[in-house]
Amino acid sequence: MKSFLRLGLIFLITLIPLYFIILVAIYHSGTAKYIPNVLDKTKNDGFLLSRLRELPNYKNVDFLFLGSSHACREFDPRIFKQYGFSSFNLGSSAQTPINSQFLFTKYINFVKPKQLIFEVFFFVFGNDGVESAIDIVSNSEIDSHNLSMALSKPNLKTLNTLSFILINRVFQPLPDISEHNLPFDSYISGGYIEKTLPDSINRKLSTISKKRKISIRPEQVHALKKIIEIAKDKNIIVTLVAAPVTQEFLNQFKNYDDFFRLISEVAGKAGIRYIDYNYPATVRFDSRKDFYDSNHLTQKGVEKFNRHLIEHFLDFTNPK
Amino acid sequence: MLFNSIEFALFLPVVFVVYWFVTAHKLKFQNLLIVISSFIFYGWWDWRFLFLLVFSASVDYVVGLGLAKQQQLKKRKLLLLVSVSVNLGLLGFFKYYNFFVESFADAFTFMGRELAKSSLKIVLPVGISFYTFQALSYSIDVYRRQLEPTKDLIAYFAFISFFPQLVAGPIERATHLLPHFYTLRTFEYAKAIDGLRQILWGLFKKMVIADNCATIVNQIFDNSVEYSGSTLFLGAILFAFQIYGDFSGYSDIAIGTARLFGFSLMRNFAYPYFSRDIAEFWRRWHISLSTWFRDYVYIPLGGSQGGTWMKVRNTVIIFLLSGFWHGANWTFIAWGFIHALYFIPLLIFKKNRVNTNTVADGKSLPSLKELAQIASTFLLTTLAWVFFRSPNIYDAFKYIGKIFSGSILTIPELEKKQIIFVPFIILLVAMEWLQRDKQHALQLESPRFPRIVKWTIYYGLVFIIIFYAGSQQEFIYFQF
């Protein structure tokens, strides 16, 4: 038994330095792209680095947006500004309620929004939040908040990424990194990403041929409730908004009704509004003209969506 | 609790330390610790199903004691009937209720009458098919007087609920595993080290091979209409590796874990994809289930006694039952039936026991004939897997039809980054080929493998798992 334990211990102890040596080698050789479990998302198309850098300039805003890519690509602060509202978009790629809760808790006392628009995209309710956690960890300084989020659901990908980013930060501190606009994606001040896609580009509207079931993780619903609770404690008005997706995309799912009912129930119990642009269709969107893929709006679609939403808010606050 | 989870990575060392340092000197304590840790392991999914496990096991325990006292054949048969009815009744309710109700209603609809389907929302308890079969083996062996019924309740529950093999086998026979619980286990260095190796190999198969294959396989099977024949063919091959990596990986971890605690579980896989014909494949794939059906169904039906047609009938029954055991879907029955069709010609021409030795024994490479036999057997099993994986028979036929279309000659439509793990499939095949005469591929014995080579392999595999493991998926066989 003694030699068994001794050998086991030697193996584990040597494994740790070897692991970090390999990570350093991966960093210097630039081979991380060939290793699926070392995901460095710094400077990716979600522009989270730029967003978090800009955040200190936004205090006491009228609206704070949270949610997945549907939030950061579909709530345009420039349109809200036209109506006299200040806003900041803290949405990010694949952000699930669990990740939103982390961001909200971390920045709420700083941004101090009057209203929170929480975008509810059914897809992310079935995700574990790992992808977004990696995005957040990759684009912010490692602190106790990040560590607790990454370690709250330990997973090889998040642990590797966390270790890799620690090494990354040693050789390249975060302030030395800068993001640049991509061919079709531009970062707009206020946390928004504008997509400019030429008409010649082939738009992929439908990717899945069989009807699927929307899966919902209880922990994501719990996180949503928690966000509402935190916001209410701070007297922040919360509105849940489901941004529009193409009918073709929606038709691929069997049970959108269940999702709608669930969110309606959460909103009803909390006494907040839930506006769903997919159920029932409040305003018509054209799959070909208003979307650049199966579920993201073009800038023209965003204009239509945002103006309708703001007018709805105005109607609600100043009824005729 | 999944074997490939952080929870299990913490659970296992704790149980190991308590087992060998606290309970090592008293058999009762060792067994009690196994029962407690097994209940924690199983209850991690849903503690409510523990009651089902306890109920099912208690019935067999009482039946066993009753059989020991009873000498009258009629009453003994009645007791056995109680055990069989309870076990198969629970299995039937939780696993097959909706299938029967829906199939019955569908049959009426087919005949022109509509019947309302009163299906229930039944949650399938994890591993029910495995532990009920294990419990049944106890009652049947006691009934056959091949085993003395135990009075030791703790040892009996430890046998039924033994956590390494509780939820996905190997399905142990009471005659083999139960006696392990009657004697104090002592720590054996070589056994424990080899157990760790087997766990490592199992984790590699599950986390790197199966979980990576799963992502692509799901994508291809869910969108089969949109893909070319060549992509569908690749999807079927990857599913063959997924299910092998998943299930044999689980078995390796189970057997390896049991060895850490001083137990020797039966072998469940013996390099099935190196089989030269279907009969050999079935001697190497899910051995614990095949032999269970052989011992408790095939032989009582008459087995190989009697004429050719009797043998054919019994073989078809076994394959259909085996398919049905996997799940309540016609696809599994079709899968079993296809294997029966593959098997019958070998049986009729008495070729089913031709390849009983290790392939290319003593040689490093197979002959051309052996290679052709291995490839054709693999191809046949791969086509049958399409039925196993498809949601219904219609989709399976469509899938196979497209494989045999002109688009088989196109380049598969997959991105490079999706198939970055394919070299590891080659590593799996190479390692298993080199070690095909061993119990598992990582059974590295000195002096053939010096310590430095062994440790390099261990480190290599650990880092491959750390950097290339796919998204965590449940073990496929948990649903069975």
Image (tube, coloured by chain):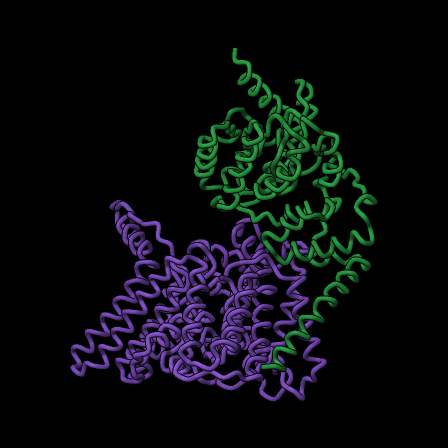
Chain colours: A green, B purple
* Quadrant of image for the C terminus of chain B: bottom left
Residue sitting farthest toward the top: A320
Q: Residue A116: horizontal and vertical position, in percent?
A: 59, 29
Q: How many marks?
A: 0
Tell me the residue at 44%/77% (across/down).
B30
Relative to A181, A215 lies left or right: left
Q: Nearer the viewer, residue B112 or A269?
A: A269
Q: Nearer the viewer, residue A65 or B304?
A: A65
Q: Residue B181: horizontal and vertical position, in percent?
A: 40, 80
In this rendering, does residue B432 appear at all? yes
Is residue B440 positioned above or below A118 on the image? below
Is residue A319 positioned above or below A266 on the image? above
Tell me the residue at 75%/61% (across/down).
A23
Q: Quadrant of residue A237?
A: top right
Q: Nearer the viewer, residue B72 or B206?
A: B72
Q: Quadrant of residue A244?
A: top right
Is residue B283 positioned above or below B100 on the image? below
Q: Residue B386: horizontal and vertical position, in percent?
A: 48, 61
Tell me the residue at 59%/58% (across/down).
B230
Is residue A308 positioned above or below B439 on the image? above
Tell me the residue at 65%/41% (across/down).
A93
In this rendering, does residue B359 appear at all? no
Q: Residue B191: horizontal and vertical position, in percent?
A: 55, 82
Q: Nearer the viewer, residue B255 or A213?
A: B255
